C-alpha cells in the first residue's frame, strides 16, 4: 500500500509486483484504478445521419470527395464492402460504388463533440478528452465493477438520449485495456474486463489492436511471425527493447495489460503558444499582423508534427504601460495555417482598442486533442493537403526556419 500526495490530495494506491517469469524485469502496477473509455461509433457518419435521416441504412463515406482524397470515416454498411478509414477514395469507390460520399463539416462535428464533452464533464470525477470522439474517465473508488459498470451504462444512456449518437464503452483497470475493450464492444456495445481477465481477454487478439502500434512496427513484428498479443506477452522484454528501442518496453507492457498512464483532467490539457517582446514599443499594425502570422504558422506546424488539433485560439497584448489584455475564440478543430491565421488577426483587431504603443504580442492554442491527418482531410482540397504535407516534410528535413511566409522576407 502506498500513500501518494498528488495535486493537494492524498491518494492511496494498491501496488503489486509483476515479473511475468522475467525476474530481471519487474514492474510496479497500480491495480486499484477503474478506467472507462467511451468512443462515439462512426462519429462523422452518425452526425451526418442525425442531420439527414435519408442516410440511415445506406453505405456512407465521409471525406474522399475526389479520386485523390482519402476516406476519413465510413459507415458499417460501407465497411462490409471492405472500405476503411485512411483508404484512398478511388479504392473506396471501386469497392463500394453505391456509397454516398459526403465532404464533411468540421464545424458541425465540433459542435456535437462539445455537447458530448459537456455531458461527460458534468457527470465525471476526472475525464480526459482524447480526441474529437473519445474520452477516458477515471472512476476509481466506486463500488468495484458492478457499481462502475452501472455508472458507465448510465453515462452512455445520457449521451444517447441527449444527442442521438451511438456510443460504445470499455471498462477496465487502465487506459490501454479499456480502449481495446471498447474496440471489441463496437458497434453500440459495452465490455467490462476485470484485472483477473486481462490476459485472457488480450491474448487471442491481433497485435493491430494495441493502441499506437505503427505500420513500421507492425511490419517488423509480422515479419517475425508474431500475429497475436499473446506472442508479444510471452517474449522477453529485453528482446523487444533491443528490436524496437524504448518503444519495445512500452509494447511489452501493453501486451501484458500494463499501463500506469493517468487520466489527465481537462484542466490539465496541454497548450502551445508563443510570445514576442518588441525591442521598441510599436503601433505598426501591419508589422504586428505579419509577426502574428509567422507565430501562427510555426505553432500550427508543431501541432501537425505532434498530431494535435486545437479548438481554441487566444491572443495576448501587453501595452507599453504593462497593461495586459487577452481574448480567445472557440473554433472547429484544426491544425492548418490558413484556418488559424484569419482567427488570430480577427482577435487582434478586436482586442487592440487602446491605440497606444504595444510592448508584446502572443498567440496560444488550447483545448488540444489528438488528431491524425485524416481528421482534416475533408476540410480542404487534396492539393491543399498535399501542400501542407510537402512543406512539413521539408521542415523536418532541413529545419523549421527553411520556409517562411512572403511577408517575413522583407
Image: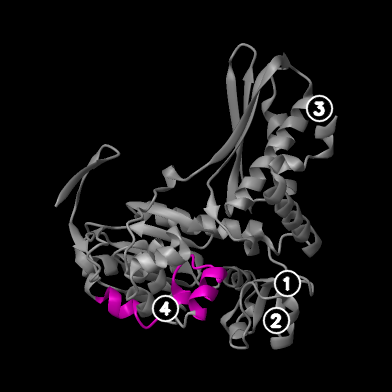
Q: What stretch is highlighted in magenta?
A: 197-223
Q: In this view, does 198 lie to the left or right of 318?
A: left
Q: Which of marks 2 and 3 is nearer the N terminus?
A: 2
Circles 1, 4 touching at the beta carbon (< 8 Å): no
Q: What element carries label 1?
A: loop
Q: Mark 1 points at which residue?
A: 64
Q: Which of marks 1 and 2 is nearer the N terminus?
A: 1
Q: What element carries label 4?
A: helix
Q: Mark 4 points at which residue?
A: 184
Q: Mark 3 points at which residue?
A: 286
Tell me how far mark 2 sits from mark 4, CA to CA: 24 Å
- Residue 290 in percent (x, y) is at 77, 32
Circle on res. 92? 2
Q: Which of marks 4 and 3 is nearer the N terminus?
A: 4
- Residue 119 in percent (x, y) is at 43, 56
Q: Is mark 3 on a helix, strand or loop?
A: helix
Q: What element carries label 2?
A: helix
Tell me how far mark 1 sits from mark 4, CA to CA: 27 Å
Amino acid at each position: 500500500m502506498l500513500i501518494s500526495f498528488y495535486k493537494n490530495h492524498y491518494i492511496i494506491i494498491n501496488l503489486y509486483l509483476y515479473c511475468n517469469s522475467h525476474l530481471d524485469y519487474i514492474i510496479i502496477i497500480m491495480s486499484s484504478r477503474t478506467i472507462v473509455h467511451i468512443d462515439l461509433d462512426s462519429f462523422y457518419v452518425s452526425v451526418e445521419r442525425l442531420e439527414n435521416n435519408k442516410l440511415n441504412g445506406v453505405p456512407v463515406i465521409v471525406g474522399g470527395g475526389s479520386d485523390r482524397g482519402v476516406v476519413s470515416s465510413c459507415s458499417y454498411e460501407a465497411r462490409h464492402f471492405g472500405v476503411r478509414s485512411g483508404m484512398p477514395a478511388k479504392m473506396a469507390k471501386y469497392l463500394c460504388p453505391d456509397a454516398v460520399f459526403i465532404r464533411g463539416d468540421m464545424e458541425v462535428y465540433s459542435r456535437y463533440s462539445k455537447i458530448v464533452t459537456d455531458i461527460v464533464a458534468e457527470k465525471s470525477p476526472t475525464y480526459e478528452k482524447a480526441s474529437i470522439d473519445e474520452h477516458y474517465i477515471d472512476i476509481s473508488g466506486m463500488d468495484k465493477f458492478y457499481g462502475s459498470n452501472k455508472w458507465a451504462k448510465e453515462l452512455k444512456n445520457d449521451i444517447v438520449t441527449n444527442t442521438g449518437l451511438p456510443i460504445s464503452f470499455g471498462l477496465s483497470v487502465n487506459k490501454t485495456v479499456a480502449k481495446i475493450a471498447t474496440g471489441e464492444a463496437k458497434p453500440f456495445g459495452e465490455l467490462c474486463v476485470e484485472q483477473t481477465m486481462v490476459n485472457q481477454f488480450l491474448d487471442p487478439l491481433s497485435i493491430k489492436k494495441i493502441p499506437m502500434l505503427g505500420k513500421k512496427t507492425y511490419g517488423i513484428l509480422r515479419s517475425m511471425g508474431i500475429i497475436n498479443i499473446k506472442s508479444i506477452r510471452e517474449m522477453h522484454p529485453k528482446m523487444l527493447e533491443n528490436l524496437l528501442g524504448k518503444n519495445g518496453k512500452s509494447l511489452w507492457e501493453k501486451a501484458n495489460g500494463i499501463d500506469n498512464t493517468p487520466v489527465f483532467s481537462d484542466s490539465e490539457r496541454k497548450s502551445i503558444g508563443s510570445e514576442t517582446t518588441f525591442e521598441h514599443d510599436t503601433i505598426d499594425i501591419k508589422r504586428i499582423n505579419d509577426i502574428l502570422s509567422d507565430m501562427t504558422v510555426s505553432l500550427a506546424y508543431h501541432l501537425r508534427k505532434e498530431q494535435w488539433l486545437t479548438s481554441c485560439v487566444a491572443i495576448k497584448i501587453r501595452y507599453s504601460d504593462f497593461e495586459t489584455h487577452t481574448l480567445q475564440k472557440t473554433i472547429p478543430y484544426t491544425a492548418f495555417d490558413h484556418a488559424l491565421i484569419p482567427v488570430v488577426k480577427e482577435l487582434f483587431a478586436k482586442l487592440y482598442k487602446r491605440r497606444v504603443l504595444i510592448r508584446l504580442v502572443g498567440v496560444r492554442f488550447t483545448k488540444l486533442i489528438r488528431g491524425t491527418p485524416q481528421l482534416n482531410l475533408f476540410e480542404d482540397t487534396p492539393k491543399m493537403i498535399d501542400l501542407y504535407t510537402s512543406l512539413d516534410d521539408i521542415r523536418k528535413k532541413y529545419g523549421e526556419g527553411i520556409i517562411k511566409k512572403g511577408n517575413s522576407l522583407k
